[in-house]
Image (cartoon, rainbow, N blue to C red):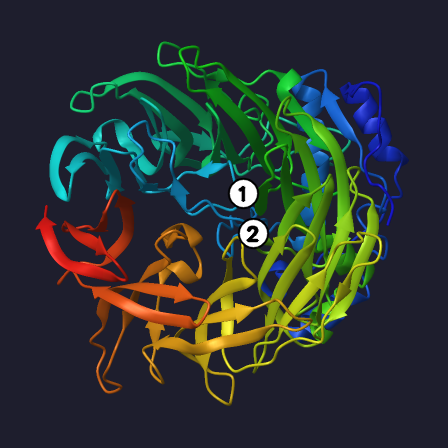
Amino acid sequence: MKGLFKRKSHLENVDESQIIKKKKMKKKTKVILFSGVALILASAIVVGCLAAFLPKTPIHEPGQYSVVQFSSKNALVARLAADGQSFDSIFGGWRSSSPLMEFGAPTANIAVDDSDSDDTQVSSTNVQVQGLDEADIVKVDGNYIYTLSYNILRIIEVSSGQMEVVWTSDFIENNFYADEIMLYEDRLAVLGRSYTVESGDSVPDYSGPLYDEAVSYPGYYYNYYSSMIAIRIYDITDRSTPVLENEIKQSGYYNTARLSGSTLYYVAQYNYYDYNVDSILPKVQNSIEEDAVEMDLADIYYIEGLPQNTYTTVGKIDLTETFLHEYNSFIAGSATVYFSGDNIYLCDYNYYSQFISNGFVSLRDNSVSGTTRIVKIGADDLEISAVGEVEGIVSDRYWLDEFQGNLRIATVTGWNQYSNVFILNENLEEIGKISQIAPGESIYSVRFTGETGSMVTFRQVDPLFLLNLSDPYNPSISEGLKKEGVSYYLHPIEGTDLTIGLGRETNENGVTQGIEVVLFDYSGEEAVIVGNPIVIGEDLYAYSEALYNPRAILYDKEKNIFAFSADYTTDPYTYNYINGYFIIGFSAEGLEIRKEIQHIGSNINRSVIIGDYLYAISLAKITSHALLENEIGDVFATL
């Protein structure tokens, strides 16, 4: 594989004439358009007719990525308009931003935080990378629980199982909608969205060589919601009287956030739809005392290679007294985002080149594989250090892992044709790979741990493959353990060869049913199952947020606890579902259900441990339960 990032001593400053000249130098192709074709591309007959007229050259050649900055907004609009025309001529004007994916099986986990001054054992959010906290709806320290639900934030003081609400805030005012929270010492960050209603028209400001004439619909005006990511930072030195110290806003939608030390990292996406000089740049508000202003062109980076209508902004905020806010914005998608600690990786799909080069024939034979483009950004300076591309699609951030400077990445090629594992060096150049894994099956979970890894694929049975990655230039894979059922999530028990798999029970036809928890032993050349799996909703149906969101899992190695919430039924003839919070114990001998907690009329979505008590949290209430030796007590107190 070639390195796809052109290293330069400085980024290009391209004016409008240079952009147009560069665009004209590319081979031009003509596309014959028929009225209404874009509306019926799904029809196999029309797709077959289109194949004869579509251009046979890809939008970009592999290895041609470079990073560009612009000297003026006109130059930026010209480039984006050129991309838009190229994209629209292929897809009939249809355009969509990349989906955000934030689920899967973590590659490493923080379970218990022992850093509190009073040595009280406190659980923490189940995260992907050790040392990087993740935003969630519940946070905890040694004396308080912080919960966010339905736009209401509460701070609850706890002591030996007793609970008291000391502060409540409703964020309905000012059209602010809170999504998640992050805690650092005496500061609480609330991450969400702020909406305003704006109006616009359909007439773009740009017309020129890239368009025969400006496309316009005179007299057509519209109202739309303008969204800004909003991060509110509170001083919670006095938990009963938090003080709003700062609010940072930015155009777009909140994607994800991490906390490294006192630095809060965030990723936001902003989609543009009009090539309007006055609105082409995202806006940013750096403090509560300032108004929102346009981003500086010096903070905008364009990555050549394929049409895009999305800004992905990566920013960081110092949560100490300074509130220093730094950011860069990249005209690139970020369907999957992975933080390693040292680097941030933005991954986006690239179906387009194969669609064009195959004349859409691949739509009919399901042979579209596509590629994933990877943008590597340094966490220190937020600058691009490499751009690469791999065969196949990455649909989960846990399919990526950085180890000793290399990036390990799993992909699925085509419509579940087969899976791959690539190893890329620091320049995102391929140095090793395992390809053609489990033809006809799709990846359901991946976990990388040091020099090893594991992968679960599924169609009718659940093959669990062990990966030997000790030699990054010559990785290898085991034959695979085959069993009924499928693991969506693989959770390592550190210091052992054991891993917990959370997924679904399946029948002999591969139909998924109840939720299954299984314990694997990786000590041999092949994985083996330890004891009997636990099934919730056996032979019927069950659902759990934990299948897709590992932050919904409580894991405690010291107390041998693995816990999550599940909805299940015991009657195949009714739709009456029960919500239970299952606390599962694990040992070298296997798994056991230690306790099922229910809040009648309300679903438990999280639990935390503070000292010798477990607190189960639902929308309606919080219950505390004493942690006894190999046993969970009944309700001790209710809030």
Residue closest to the far front: 629
**Within-10-Å neighbours for mark 1: few <14, some 14–19, many 20+:** many
| Residue at 79% from the left image edge and 59% from the top image edge | 475
* Location of mark 1 (residue): 129
Asked whether the viewer can see residue 22, the reply is yes
Judged from the image, the secondary structure of the residue bearing numbered disc 1 is loop
Measured from the top left, where is residue 214 in percent x and y?
Answer: 65, 34
Nearest the viewer among 364 and 106 is 106
Asked whether the viewer can see residue 220, the reply is no
Q: Quadrant of residue 91?
A: bottom right
Measured from the top left, where is residue 506 in percent x and y?
Answer: 46, 82
| Residue at 64% from the left image edge and 45% from the top image edge | 347
* Location of mark 2 (residue): 107
Judged from the image, the secondary structure of the residue bearing numbered disc 2 is loop
Q: Quadrant of residue 453?
A: bottom right
Measured from the top left, where is residue 115 in percent x and y?
Answer: 38, 32
State the separation of the CA atoms marked 2 and 1. 7 Å
Measured from the top left, where is residue 139 in percent x and y?
Answer: 32, 38
Q: From the viewer's perspective, is residue 299 above or below residue 485?
A: above
Q: Are marks 2 and 1 in contact (CB under 8 Å)?
A: yes
Q: In the image, is 507 to the left or to the right of 631?
A: right
| Residue at 62% from the left image edge and 49% from the top image edge | 93
Q: In the image, is 211 to the left or to the right of 521?
A: right
Q: From the viewer's perspective, is residue 102 above or below residue 216?
A: below
| Residue at 12% from the left image edge and 40% from the top image edge | 163
Q: Earlier in the sequence, mark 2 or mark 1?
A: 2
Q: In the image, is 258 to the left or to the right of 419?
A: left
**Within-10-Å neighbours for mark 2: few <14, some 14–19, many 20+:** many
| Residue type at numbered disc 2 | Thr
| Residue type at numbered disc 1 | Val
Q: From the viewer's perspective, is residue 71 above or below residue 383?
A: above
Q: From the viewer's perspective, is residue 555 above or below residue 532?
A: above
